[in-house]
Amino acid sequence: MQIAKVRGTVVSTQKDPSLRGVKLLLLQLVDEEGQLLQEYEVAADNVGAGVDEWVLVSRGSAARHVEGSEQRPLDAAVIAIIDTVHVEDRVIYSKKDQYR
């Protein structure tokens, strides 16, 4: 799993029929210091995440273990919206502080 920040959405009118109705998000990966990496990924959204929220991303075959996604051609899925991230003795992300 990896931490990422939601940067936007991806809209596709022509896609595999199994992906109809699946919300796709553009994610920017985050390192252990809370810094945004120059790596992006598209993932199916299973939890209703929004732009600028930090999320937990599951990849590979684990992304298809989400209920209803077993037969979809997914390589990444958003499985949680993050409230806080603590590293050692400090908070590197807090959702409640983000919107102040």
Image: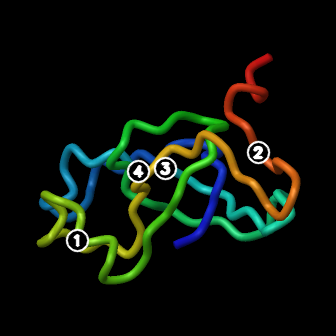
Q: Amino acid at mark 2?
A: Tyr
Question: Decide: marks 2, 1 in contact (CB < 8 A)?
Answer: no
Numbered disc 3: secondary structure: strand
Q: Considering the numbered disc 1 on the image, is that residue within a helix, a strand or a loop?
A: helix
In the displayed structure, would residue 54 be above or below residue 77?
above
Instruction: Say which amino acid is labelled 1.
Output: His
The quarter of the picture where residue 40 lies is bottom right
Which percent across, then down, holds residue 45?
Answer: 38, 49
Q: CA distance from mark 3 to mark 4?
A: 4 Å
What amino acid is at disc 3?
Answer: Leu
Per the image, the residue denoted by label 1 is 65
Mark 1 to mark 3 CA distance (whole Å): 18 Å
Q: Residues within 10 Å of mark 2 (few under 14, many from 20)?
A: some
Question: What residue is rendered at 86% in x and 63% in y?
Answer: 33
The residue carrying pointer 4 sits among few (fewer than 14), some (14 to 19) or many (20 or more) residues within 10 Å by Cα, namely: many
Q: Nearer the viewer, mark 2 or mark 1?
A: 2
Q: How packed is label 1: few (under 14 Cα within 10 Å), some, or many (20 or more)?
A: few
Mark 2 lies on a secondary structure that is strand
- In the picture of the structure, the residue carrying the numbered disc 3 is 25
Q: Nearer the viewer, mark 1 or mark 3?
A: 1
Q: Which residue is mark 2?
A: 93
Relative horizontal placement of residue 57, taking residue 29 as reference (left or right): left
Task: Say what secondary structure mark 4 lies in.
Answer: strand
Q: CA distance from mark 2 to mark 1?
A: 27 Å
Quadrant of the snapshot with the C terminus? top right
Q: Which of these two is toward me, 41 or 16?
A: 41
Give the camera-side residue of 71 and 58.
58
Residue sitting nearer the eye, 53 or 84: 84
